[in-house]
């Protein structure tokens, strides 16, 4: 393979059997110029050219972002693939590299990064969050910059989105934001403070994610007979009224409905928090 273009010291464009490819590898372009032969032992990652905006954006990122930022983002992606035992959606190489470089730039300039969804992310995406913790140690070692938990949450979101082959982070953000909104409704309507570092909180958040994903996909989740629904409405009146408020809010803001039986399950989760609050 001959070098067609050098993007940076660690990235080149080549022509291989009538296919254009981007090759990544530490020092792959060192002491090289156009038309030189590529050293195969230096190749770490290969991307075949596609006539898509992502491919062109990736070229631009490789040419413009700091090389150490790109190397770090690629190390994190490789670690994520190894830990999750999957091949991550290639779009992450564009979105995540760009995001991480900007985050590093802000932190190095003393700016504060806030993530209002951090607690939900920790519960919803624990494996991805652990990868974020690994990334923190890597960035500290390579750049001497401390990555706060809020940014680790952002890293986890990017990895989760790519892991599930989503086109962008919109769906992931929608679900996580919706859960945050639902928890705020519970706290306000019942005048309680939901402690986030508890099993009950984890169960509620996990249940809500599961329910939202399945309802959006048009799948049935639970079966409750009419008698049980009536019992829940009667026994957990305040919790069920709160669940109804949640249902109204979700329909208005997000455009889909919780079935009555699902609202009953949500009410049972709410009741746990309500009982503990009243007992104090």
Image (cartoon, rainbow, N blue to C red):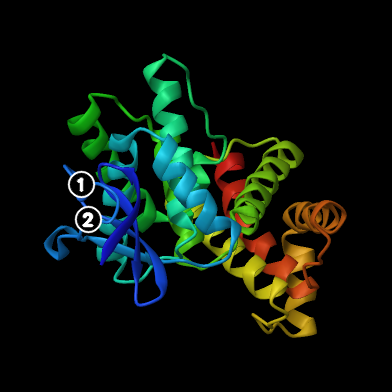
Element under label 2?
loop
What residue appears at the point 52 percent right and 28 percent down from the top-left corner? 114
Q: Position of residue 35 (x, y in %)?
A: 28, 56
What residue appears at the point 75 percent right and 72 percent down from the top-left corner? 231
Q: Which residue is mark 1?
A: 32
The answer to whether 268 appears left or right of 117 in the picture is right
Does residue 157 appear in this view? no
Q: 10 Å neighbourhood of mark 2: few (<14), some, or many (≥20)?
A: some
The Cα–Cα distance between marks 2 and 1, rounded to whole angstroms, is 6 Å
Q: 10 Å neighbourhood of mark 1: few (<14), some, or many (≥20)?
A: some
Q: Position of residue 129 (x, y in %)?
A: 37, 49
Residues at marks 2 and 1 touching, judged by CB atoms closer than 8 Å: yes
User: In this view, which residue lies farthest toward the top?
Assistant: 110
Q: Position of residue 109 (x, y in %)?
A: 42, 15
* The one of 187 and 237 positioned closer to us in this rendering: 187
Q: Which residue is mark 2?
A: 36
| Quadrant location of the C terminus in the rendered image | top right
User: In this view, which residue lies farthest toward the front?
Assistant: 35
- Please tell me the numbered disc located at residue 57: none
* The one of 4 and 270 positioned closer to us in this rendering: 4
């Amino acid at each position: 393979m001959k070098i067609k273009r050098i993007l940076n010291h660690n990235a080149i464009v080549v022509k291989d059997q009538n296919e254009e490819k981007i090759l990544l590898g530490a020092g792959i372009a060192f002491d090289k110029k156009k038309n030189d032969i590529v050293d195969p032992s230096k190749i770490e990652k290969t991307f075949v050219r596609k006539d898509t905006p992502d491919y062109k954006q990736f070229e631009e990122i490789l040419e413009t972002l700091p090389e150490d930022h790109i190397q770090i983002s690629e190390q994190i992606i490789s670690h994520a693939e190894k830990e999750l035992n999957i091949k991550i959606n290639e779009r992450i190489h564009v979105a995540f590299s760009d995001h991480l470089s900007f985050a590093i730039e802000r932190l190095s300039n003393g700016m504060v990064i806030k993530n209002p969804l951090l607690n939900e992310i920790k519960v919803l995406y624990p494996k991805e969050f652990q990868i974020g913790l690994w990334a923190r140690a890597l960035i500290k070692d390579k750049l001497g910059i401390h990555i706060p938990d809020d940014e680790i949450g952002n890293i986890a979101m990017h990895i989760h989105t790519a892991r599930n082959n989503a086109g962008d982070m919109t769906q992931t953000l929608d679900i996580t934001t919706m859960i945050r909104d639902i928890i705020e409704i519970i706290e306000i309507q019942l005048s309680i403070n939901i402690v986030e570092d508890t099993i009950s909180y984890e169960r509620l958040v996990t249940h809500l994610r599961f329910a939202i994903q399945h309802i959006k996909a048009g799948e049935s989740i639970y079966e409750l007979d009419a008698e049980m629904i009536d019992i829940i409405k009667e026994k957990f009146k305040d919790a069920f009224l709160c669940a109804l408020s949640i249902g109204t809010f979700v329909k208005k803001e997000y455009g889909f409905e919780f079935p009555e039986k699902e609202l009953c399950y949500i009410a049972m989760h709410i009741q746990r928090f309500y009982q503990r609050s009243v007992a104090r």
